[in-house]
Image: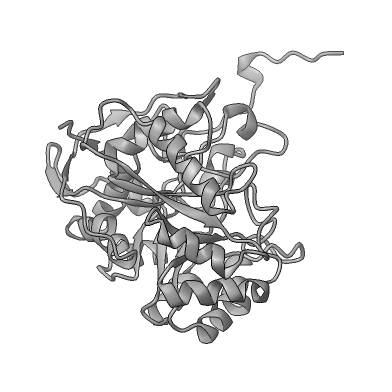
Amino acid sequence: TDIKQSKSSLPYCSPSHHYLPRNMSSQSSAPEGTKLTITLPDDFHHHFRDGPATANVLEHATQQFGRAIAMPNLRPPVTTTEMALEYRQRILSSLPKDLPHGSFEPLMTLYLTDNTSPDEIKKAFATGHIKACKYYPAGATTNSDAGVTDVKKTYPALRAMEEIGMVLCIHSEVSTPGIDIFDREPVFIEEIIKPLVKDMPKLKIVMEHISTKDAVDYVMTAPDNVKASITCHHLLYNRNALLVGGIKPHFYCLPILKRETHREALLRAATSGSNKFFLGTDSAPHAVEAKEAACGCAGAYTAHCAVQLYAEAFESMGALDKLEAFCSFHGADHYQLPRNKQKITLEKKSWIVPKRYSFGISQLVPIRAGESVAWSIVPN
């Protein structure tokens, strides 16, 4: 027998701003109308997906970024030079006709496997379009089944990367079933990252979307070739946003949101001015039916307002003067890319995020859906 519920009998989930940490929900310091002009940012971790939905994602990404690292975890994964170049062309073909900043460049990556060869690495890097390899521990996140099962199997490819100066982007979590999901990043640092850095001291590494104080502490003391990206949602939210007052699947991401002490450490790191940390949104769109399910996908969508959310985080620390370097300089420098020449202007002017955006033949629910964002981008 079907059981029908009235709207009034359905569980109530409070808006996400109810779970902002105290210093994030307080009155911010910059007065309304404040304007801040910075160099056009880049995003060093972006999921464009593939097919009709790519155009929807690009409508948002091109508003605030000049370049973005394109994640390779498609089906099938982007494991060869030819696949990466073909994917690049599909992204370029999906760009809006009118680009707000005149251009947009997808920076391509290869999906690292146990069998990636040194020759493939050198071939990819020689194109000038493929800037990095992505290390997914097998089974760690969305479409990572073909990922690395044993880091030592990748050493021939990694030595080639070290030789030519190619960046290794790492999803820094173990996927061992017995390891608690909140502990997978610290365990990865001890078991994988530290031995890898010792074995290959010149390999350029990005620990992507770090989520713990453990990662902050490690990166701060690691050699200069080891850097980290931080997402805006890990700066703004702790695990209460996901779990308190009802499970909210659109805050479910990997690495999972952690307790407040970790968020505070990330915020201090991002706003410190250290060139060890830079912007990487890990904006990961999924159709609403794939998120609001018995087994929902991991990923938070922030492409629609990422730079504005970073501004909120930096403002909360009185560090808006550090925003430009974090968003626009540190990542480009690590990837040995010229800094963008274009500018972008933010204004302290709130706006309401739509409850849904188009996503191919479906829709997606973004972070802050139906709620306000404190900063806006001033149109060119």
On the rendered image, what quadrant is the N terminus found in? Answer: top right
Q: Is residue 122 above or below residue 94?
A: below
Q: From the viewer's perspective, tell me whether residue 136 is left or right of residue 370.
A: right
Q: Nearer the viewer, residue 127 or 282?
A: 127
If the image is split into quadrants, where does the C terminus sit? top left
Q: For this view, does 374 lie left or right of residue 138?
A: left
- Compared with 126, 42 (above or below) is above
Q: Is residue 95 visible?
A: yes
Give the color scheme: rainbow, by chain, secondary structure or one colour: one colour
Residue 319 % position (x, y): 21, 59
- Taking the spot 29% from the left edge, 47% from the top edge, the residue there is 312
Q: Nearer the viewer, residue 77 or 378?
A: 77
- Residue 84 is left or right of residue 151, and the answer is left
Residue at position x 21%, y 37% in the image: 101
The picture places residue 241, in percent across and down from the top left corner, at 51, 45
Residue 170 visible: no
Q: x, y percentage for residue 103?
A: 25, 39
**Vertical side of 242 occupied by 326: above or below:** below
For image coordinates 52% across by 24% down, the residue present is 360
Residue 346 placement (x, y as % from top left): 19, 41
| Residue 97 found in image quarter | top left
